[in-house]
Image (tube, grey):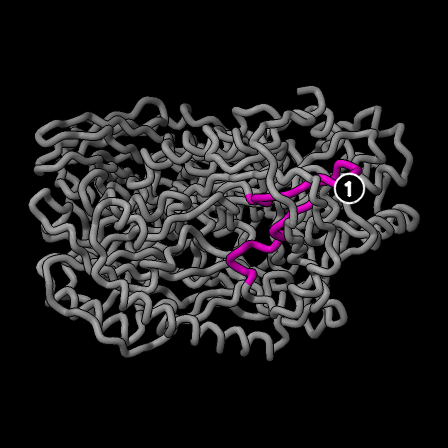
Amino acid sequence: MKFLNLITISIAILFINLAFASSVEKRCFKKKNKGFTRFSGDEVYSYEKEHIKTLASYSSECTVLLKKNGDFPLTKEDTRKVYLYGNAVRKTLKGGTGSGDVNLREFVNIETAFTNAGFEVLTKDFIDAYDEVYEKANKEFQEELNNNGGGILNMGAIMSEPEYDLPYVKEGDLAIYVLGRVSGEGTDRKPIKGDLFLTDTERKMINDLAKGFKKFMLVLNTGGPIDLSDLDDVKNILILSQLGVNTSNTLVDVITGAKYPSGKLATTWTKYEDYQTIGDFAEKDDTNYKEGIYVGYRYFDTVNTDVMYPFGFGLGYTDFEYEIKSSKLNGETFEVKTNVKNVGKYKGKEVMEVYLSKPNTTLDEPYQILVGFAKTDELKPNKKQTLTIKFKLSDFASYDTKTATYILDKGDYVVRVGNSSRNTKPCGVIKVESRIDVRKVENKLGDPGFEDYVPKINSKKEDLSNVKTFTLNAKKVKKETVDYDYSYPIAKEVKALTLEEKAKLVIGGYVEDFIESLIGAAVTTVAGAAAETNTLDGKLKPIIMADGPAGVRIAKSYFLDSDGKAHNLEGNLPESMMSLLPPEMLQLVDASMPKPSVNDTIYHQYASAIPIGTALAQSWNKEFAEACGDIVGSEMVMFGVNLWLAPALNIHRSILCGRNFEYYSEDPFISGIMASAITNGVQEHKNAFVTLKHFAANNQETNRYLNSSNVSERAMREIYLKAFEMAIKEADPKAIMTSFNLLNGVHTSESKELTNDILRHEFGFDGLVMTDWVIAMEGEYKYPNPSASNVIKATGDLFMPGSQADYENVLEAIKNKTLTMEELEMAVTKIYKLSKQIEKK
């Protein structure tokens, strides 16, 4: 990937925006300023304690127990001397790298968490020796990056885990191996040792410890799947995931039994060779989604691959049994009740999942799709609970591209209930006597240039003779035809603005230096925020934006200059990416950035790091997702942020996507449920709104700016747009962020069919649409860069991060009549109204 050649190094330098505090902090106080709170002082604030406590009460629900033999949790009689091994014992990961990183006050690693809990860690010498190995490998890695250009050229670059030969204890009472893998935006994962695969060192150590220790647990501090083949001797495996601020303490709680795992996989974990390779991945110019709708478990279950750990799977310390109590069809709403009983010796929670198998009548269909789920309360041994799960059949209509219609095809729809996609029982059959057209639309997304894959299935006839059958009354299904003839009303105040003011508003607030604007230097109010909208010289209140989705990413420390502008003391680059830049760049920045005087007060903004998106989905707990949203929303209000650039709900199409940790699942339904819940939690707070991203088909990081995701109309609508549609209709988000990539040769941000016709008309979205942070690319690429005027013409509203060139592009388009005044004013109206809404509250 070749970036703007002449300014690449400058971008990398200014991206950091470092300044170092030379003042001594003054006494602690809270200062209300312009509707938000400024904190100064060293003590842990009450909101921090409250938010950590809330997260701690749920975080173990994100952990997934893959294997167990009854050795855990530890009992009071078990030793409190532990051998801790693995790269993540001291270098514990709270989340991935990139814009989703969170600058929290402090983070306790796993080694410290065990020590704080009263354990004697017997491997400190080993961990020290490993640190030397790691630092040597990392130094060589950084030198290689710098020799290749350094800086933003290597955004997201991740060092593979090194091989080493260190002595270690192979026998004893208790050992825990914590294996970490980090990923981030800018670079995709690789199917190599030290990334997707275990290193030879890791595999040997893990197997030795499993054989030699009386009790052994393999813990996975990863943001996504790794290949766990050839670990047959390991009897206890826990996906800890990356849980934000409480990652390490949660592991201690789970090991000791103070908490218990109750998570389920939201993405299939199996051997790398099992994953489908029908479609392309990580291609430079065109990535062809030839697998169509057969993504994740839809593929595995249809072709009946014997996966290691299926979608929806997860064990607990205890065991559960379930039985179907009743099922019924009311109109087009199907309801199933199941009795769940704890038949083990520990307390726990269970998840019941409902799947739908559609008939293969005129359209090919996956074996089953998730249509509902529910999680029990905490159940003590021998206690039971009845769970009720409902779904509307028409919500899962299939898309017929030939007629541009969502349909319920003729045939039998089998409903299944169970605790994973591979452990279900039929609980009902819905008979549809003739095809039902549910919603008539138009094909809008172009031709991908290929026909979707259709699997060859040799399935046995299923005996459903004892399963209750219901006949759907077609009159109960509400039919809809979408009308695309609609224009957004223009505010009279907008018409009164000058052309120059209108053009300014649709471009993110910027300084004339494009590079500084790119990195957030134009933000004047909230240090470390991603951006703010233009104020028209004070006529409008700015809409202030901060990155997500693992919490609010703003600066930990800052000071105010004589004009009241906030200056970041740590820099806008996430801490996890700081090491990608050579020392000489940091020195140049230090010499150029504003610094506080001795008399300046140093303020703090300690945000809470919530679990990564994948971990949150693994909880299968909507209440937890909403609680995370509540935490984020309250901190947004506290620090003066209006738009959280999250949640991210793209699909885990490939386990190699570098940004998967930010996303929820390979399944659009659970993604939509989680995004809706976290949106509701955020938007309960005044002036706090979400920005769903990345719309749409953002499923790889390789050449993410100029790569075309080529996807069929059906796959887009049933897989990649479904979660967005759900969240928009159920939670009313106030903003949407388009993706960098193109879709079938058209930039998503420049696609009127995607933004106006589908998003606004079909989904009913009436909020603000912004671009992701556009970087113009130079070099040999098949596709051109997007332009601000084209984005506005496509009914996008805000071109980010904005520059003088983008502003002039809009003015030129009006002059040349390639952009109409009405199109510009429609965009301005959305920004104007949101700004005024914030101003009133």
Identify the residue position indicated by label 1 in the image. 506
Q: Is residue 575 magenta?
A: yes
Q: Nearer the viewer, residue 338 or 244?
A: 244
Whether residue 39 sits left or right of residue 119 in the image: it is: right
Q: Position of residue 539 (x, y in %)?
A: 83, 29
User: Can you see residue 387?
Assistant: yes
When the figure is inspected, residue 225 is found, relative to residue 735, above or below; the finding is below
Q: Nearer the viewer, residue 299 or 331?
A: 299
Q: Is residue 361 magenta?
A: no
Which picture quadrant has residue 388? top left
Q: Residue at x 70, y 20 (%)?
A: 840
Which picture quadrant has residue 272? bottom left
Which picture quadrant has residue 580? bottom right
Q: Position of residue 241 (x, y in %)?
A: 34, 51
Whether residue 658 sits left or right of residue 775 in the image: it is: left
| Quadrant of the drawing holding the N terminus | bottom right
Q: Residue at x 73, y 34 (%)?
A: 542
Disc tally is: 1
| Quadrant of the drawing holding the C terminus | top right
Q: Residue at x 63, y 53 (%)?
A: 571
Q: Residue at x 32, y 71 (%)?
A: 129
When the figure is inspected, residue 742 is found, relative to residue 53, above or below; the finding is below
When the figure is inspected, residue 603 is found, relative to residue 332, above or below; the finding is below
Q: Residues within 10 Å of mark 1 (few under 14, many from 20)?
A: many
User: Can you see residue 629?
Assistant: no
Whether residue 779 sits left or right of residue 814 in the image: it is: left
Which residues are drawn in magenta?
A: 553-578
> At label 1, which amino acid type do we have?
Val
Q: Nearer the viewer, residue 75 or 466?
A: 75
Q: Position of residue 321 (x, y in %)?
A: 12, 37
Q: Position of residue 137 (x, y in %)?
A: 43, 75
